[in-house]
Amino acid sequence: MAVGRKGAAIPAETVAEIVATAHRLADAARGETLRLFRSPDLRPDNKLTQGFDPVTEADRASERAMRAILARERAEDAILGEEYGAQPGVSGLTWVLDPIDGTRAFMAGAPSWGVLIGLADDQGPIYGIVDQPHLGERFEGGFGRALLTARDGMQTPLAVRRGVDLSQATLMTTYPEVGSPQEYAAFRRVADRVRLTRYGLDCYAYALLAAGHVDLVIEAGLQSYDVAAPIAVVQAAGGIVTDWTGGPAHQGGRIVAAGSEDLHAQALELLAE
């Protein structure tokens, strides 16, 4: 038996190995991030000479720990990580790692950051984990799996919320200003039509969409490591993730995620006006 898509089948035993490795990555990242979360020893650095793009030792240690596991267990796979860049592979599979998505939230002690672990082939994400170490919540999607595992080990199926009219929808994004002035104006056209708009949850917003609590997530200016894992989780839960034109979203940029085809279509129409 094999699991895969469009001819790129992956044997079931290999899928089991991949899933086990992904969970070991998430476990290792939990240890490294929690070691410094809400710690007085946290000393953020700024990646930019103008503006502010923070990185901490927790980001770097988290990615190093995950890369060390992949070197032992999946050395043939490629890696793309936020902090240490790209490493080539020969298997046709790439691990896409964001060791802390939401470093600003991490710095502020807010539990809305997460560790993102995605696995992609040449067509995009096929499996992903969105892990929130402080809350002990792990959202997983792909290979026929769509699960939330709580701190106590209890597992709950993930499923998006359907049948919600745009006027009753909950919309989320990370930054109120979203992107450029033009992108912000497009976002406002959607925000002005929904019941509730909330800000600031980074990857956790996509996890809440997959769990059926949020109906739309709209963002701009993202990188591939920001979206690979969330795309896999949302799609596994029955949702849709594209760019603002309805095309593939796994390279980043402008992202719209929705719990239903109807909401997705309405959002795209408003964004394009």
Image (tube, rainbow, N blue to C red):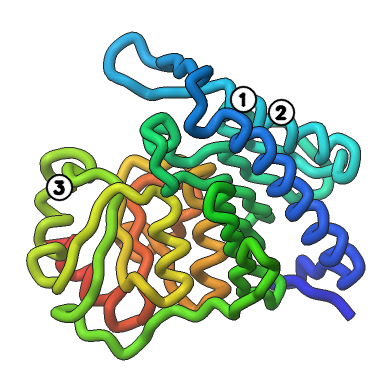
In the image, is residue 95 above or below residue 241? above
Residue identifier under label 1: 60
In the rendered structure, are the residues bearing label 2 and label 3 in contact, judged by CB atoms less than 8 Å apart?
no
Q: Position of residue 252 (x, y in %)?
A: 43, 46
Mark 2 → mark 1, Cα distance in angstroms? 6 Å
Residue at point 89%, 44% (across, down)? 73
Question: Which-is-in-front pick, marks 3 and 1?
Answer: 1
Residue identifier under label 3: 184
Counting residues from the N terminus, which is met first, the one under dot 2 or under dot 3?
Answer: 2
Residue at point 48%, 32% (across, down)? 38
Determine the residue located farthest toward the bottom in the rendered image: 163
Q: Position of residue 176 (x, y in %)?
A: 18, 46
Residue at point 28%, 18% (across, down)? 51
Residue identifier under label 2: 64
Q: Position of residue 5 (x, y in %)?
A: 70, 72
Mark 3 → mark 1, Cα distance in angstroms? 32 Å
